[in-house]
Image: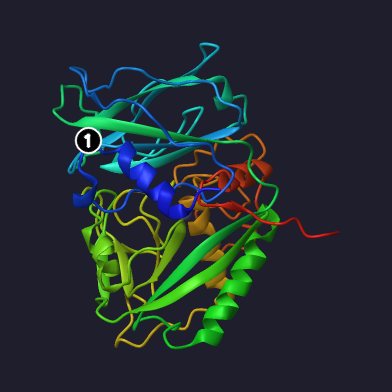
């Protein structure tokens, strides 16, 4: 049994070839149980075409794998190619945008550092081994960069035997004065209970590890896919992050401010990257104020609605995309239709429930630990 402290150190060493650990935030935490040792590749450079050389993940006894990729500050990159041991191609290019819409294995663009969780399923069997290449992306435009880059990339991976039948995930609530949850433990407990009601079908249970207040959170925070400094700074006043624990930040008004398509729009919830656990502002953000309201009194959202949105955002954190995108593109998972909690409008009446593929993806995240199966 390895303690989380030892794991953190091992992960730190894994990246020591790139940047000294002491100068950096702690790397993402490996799971506390059930995982094989963290494996690493030598750091590689992005070549003339903006791509890394092929990096091979050898076969392992397991069904899913978590890849940690870390580059240098100011560098954005994406999975540019994924080929399995049988020569089948699952990803063949960098798509412009925050994530790949039609890749056989869908992943999101990374800023500086990211966790990619690749579960088996839909024909992809990572345990047979596979090869990946990463490619540079312009952080400002989210388009592929096809020239050599000075930055290097370090890759580490953690195979996982099989996702547990039931999983448990630790949360921490960070509550600003703009949230109706501030100073109200009873309401916090009720929200958690309703959230567990939403997650039940996915075999996931959440527990609350801690609650902390954010006294200095501003009334409004603006952000975009790669402009996350405002969101990241919301956590500045919080105690240090806990191992393998998702921070849920109850902020003020939250506005998604796309530099190409204005004006800024208020959101009901936001997860900076599909596939959380590493990189900037890796948390779930929930608004506490209505952006269009006069005065600064916390909005009194119904707990059921908040629980539904929070469950949807946790789905993103654990690697799920929308069941159908705004432009009509549906997710590629064969058993998942639009009427699902990962619909872009989780508050709609029909947006309920989780599919088996979604469950497998969520329970494959290394922060999800096995939970005892309740007796029938
Ligand atoms: Zn969403």
Q: Name, please, the residue furthest toward the left.
A: 150
Residue at (44% x, 84% y) in the render: 180
Badge 1 local density, few (<14 within 10 Å), some, or many (20+)? some
Is 236 drawn above or below residue 184 in the view shown? Answer: above
Camera-side residue of 40 and 202: 40
Q: Position of residue 220 (x, y in %)?
A: 26, 73
Camera-side residue of 144 and 374: 374
Residue 346 in sight in this render: no
Is 308 drawn above or below residue 282 in the view shown? Answer: below
Q: Position of residue 156 (x, y in %)?
A: 38, 34
Residue at (44% x, 42% y) in the render: 327
Q: Quadrant of residue 190?
A: bottom right
Is 289 drawn above or below residue 64 in the view shown? Answer: below
Residue at (28% x, 69% y) in the render: 234
Q: How many marks?
A: 1
The C terminus sits in image quarter: bottom right
Residue 38 in sight in this render: yes
Camera-side residue of 111 and 30: 30
Residue at (59% x, 52% y) in the render: 369
Q: Position of residue 358 (x, y in %)?
A: 61, 45
Q: Which residue is mark 1?
A: 18
């Amino acid at each position: 049994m390895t303690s989380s402290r030892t794991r953190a150190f091992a992960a730190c060493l894994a990246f020591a070839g790139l940047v000294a650990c002491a100068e950096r935030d702690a790397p993402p935490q490996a799971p506390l149980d059930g995982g094989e040792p963290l494996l690493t590749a030598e750091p590689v450079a992005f070549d003339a075409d903006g791509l890394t050389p092929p990096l091979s993940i050898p076969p392992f006894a397991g069904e899913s794998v978590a890849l940690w990729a870390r580059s240098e500050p100011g560098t954005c990159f994406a999975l540019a190619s994924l080929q399995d041991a049988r020569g089948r191609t699952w990803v063949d290019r960098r798509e412009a945008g925050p994530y790949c819409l039609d890749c056989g294995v869908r992943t999101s663009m990374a800023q500086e550092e990211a966790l990619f969780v690749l579960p088996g399923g839909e024909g992809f069997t990572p345990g047979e081994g596979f090869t990946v290449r990463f490619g540079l992306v312009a952080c400002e435009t989210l388009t592929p960069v096809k020239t050599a880059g000075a930055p290097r990339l370090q890759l580490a991976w953690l195979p996982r035997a099989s996702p547990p039948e039931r999983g448990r995930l630790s949360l921490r609530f960070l509550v600003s004065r703009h949230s109706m949850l501030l100073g109200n433990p009873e309401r916090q407990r009720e929200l958690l209970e309703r959230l567990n009601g939403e997650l039940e079908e996915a075999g996931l249970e959440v527990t609350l590890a801690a609650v902390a207040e954010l006294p200095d959170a501003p009334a409004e925070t603006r952000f975009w896919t790669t402009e996350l400094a405002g969101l990241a700074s919301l956590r500045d006043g919080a105690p240090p992050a806990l191992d393998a624990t998702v921070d849920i930040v109850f902020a003020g008004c939250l506005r998604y401010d796309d530099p190409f398509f204005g004006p800024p729009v208020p959101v009901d919830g936001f997860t900076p990257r599909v596939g959380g656990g590493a990189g900037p502002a890796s948390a779930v953000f929930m608004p506490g104020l209505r952006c269009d309201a006069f005065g600064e009194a916390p909005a009194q959202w119904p707990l059921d609605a908040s629980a539904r949105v929070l469950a949807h955002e946790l789905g993103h954190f654990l690697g799920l995309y929308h069941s159908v995108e705004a432009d009509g593109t549906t997710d590629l998972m064969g058993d998942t239709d639009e009427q699902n909690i990962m619909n872009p409008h989780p508050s709609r009446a029909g947006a309920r429930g989780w599919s088996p593929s979604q469950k497998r993806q969520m329970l494959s995240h290394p922060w999800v630990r096995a939970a005892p199966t309740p007796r029938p």
